[in-house]
Amino acid sequence: MVFSGVSSSVKMGKIVIENLYYFSENPMLDCNQFIIVDKENDELALFDAGNGLSLKGLIEGMSKLGLNYEQITRVYLTHEHVDHVLGIYPLIKLLSNSPPELFAYGETAKILRKGDESKIFPGNLGISPGMFGLEIIPLKVNDLKVEETISIGSEFIFKIYYTPGHSLGSICYYESSKKILIPGDLVFAGGSFGRYDFPGGSLNALIESIKFVNNLDVKYLLPGHMNISDNGNQQIESSYRMVQSIGNYF
């Protein structure tokens, strides 16, 4: 295996619940990633793709937990930003004989199909694909629909919710029976929440989206950055209070 760019450290993984694994973000513009095991079909589903440079670290972290990256058959994205989608490109290249299917909603799917570099790298961040050793190319993407359900085996059934505010393509994945929320960069543990100053961001939309997920029954909060939590509702409520205070200020 050959990976472009600077090598990353191992992405340390742990079991959240049976057949659901968490891999923590590497420093410098990466994201948390989650693997769900479809035991019935001997396949893996990956949630968010990281920054590309961290793919080697993810694969090493998976190996330590007995997971084989060659079994990744589906990649589900939460939104279109660099730290969540760049890993798609080296992963598809690595699994070129049997590439995983990609799933995204709305603007995220459109951006990836067009290979729109300017939307993947939001704002004036001063970074480019070349810095990650990657080239942005058009991709085949399956469109997700609002309130559509996706099944990973018979054990995990997620519903899709559109939750803009951080970006135009932002969605959450919610598994009601296990009370799991994968919110991307909408809301984080510790009372924090996603930036709304990138193109397509909106403080008002962010407040409404956090208000919506605050009404869901969430035990496991699995956000795109920082720590995960098994006390999800309390964390979301804290973030909602904080973002409301900012909205009231403006």
Image (tube, grey):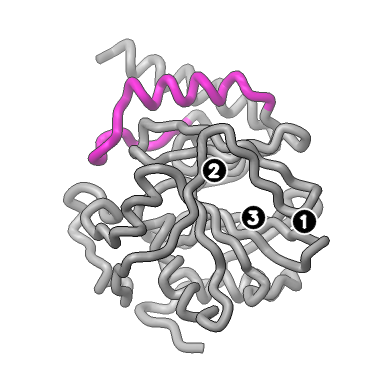
* Magenta segment boundaries in residue numbering: 192-217
- Residue 174 image offset from top left, x and y in percent: 63, 36
Dot 3 amino acid type: Tyr
Residue displayed at 51% across by 39% down:
145
Judge whether 243 appears above or below 162 on screen.
above
Image quadrant where one finds the C terminus? top left
Label 1, label 3: how far apart the Cα atoms are: 10 Å
Residue 216 is inside the magenta segment: yes
Residue displayed at 50% across by 71% down:
55
Judge whether 137 appears above or below 31 on screen.
below
Seen in the image, is 111 located left or right of residue 67? left
Asked whether disc 2 touches disc 1, contact meaning CB atoms under 8 Å apart, the reply is: no
Badge 2 local density, few (<14 within 10 Å), some, or many (20+)? many
- Residue 230 image offset from top left, x and y in percent: 70, 37
Seen in the image, is 38 located left or right of residue 189? right
> In terms of secondary structure, where does tag 2 sit?
loop
Figure quadrant of residue 137: bottom left
> In terms of secondary structure, where does tag 1 sit?
loop
Q: Is residue 32 visible?
A: no
Residue displayed at 44% across by 75% down:
90
Q: Which residue is mark 3?
A: 22
Q: Which residue is mark 2?
A: 223
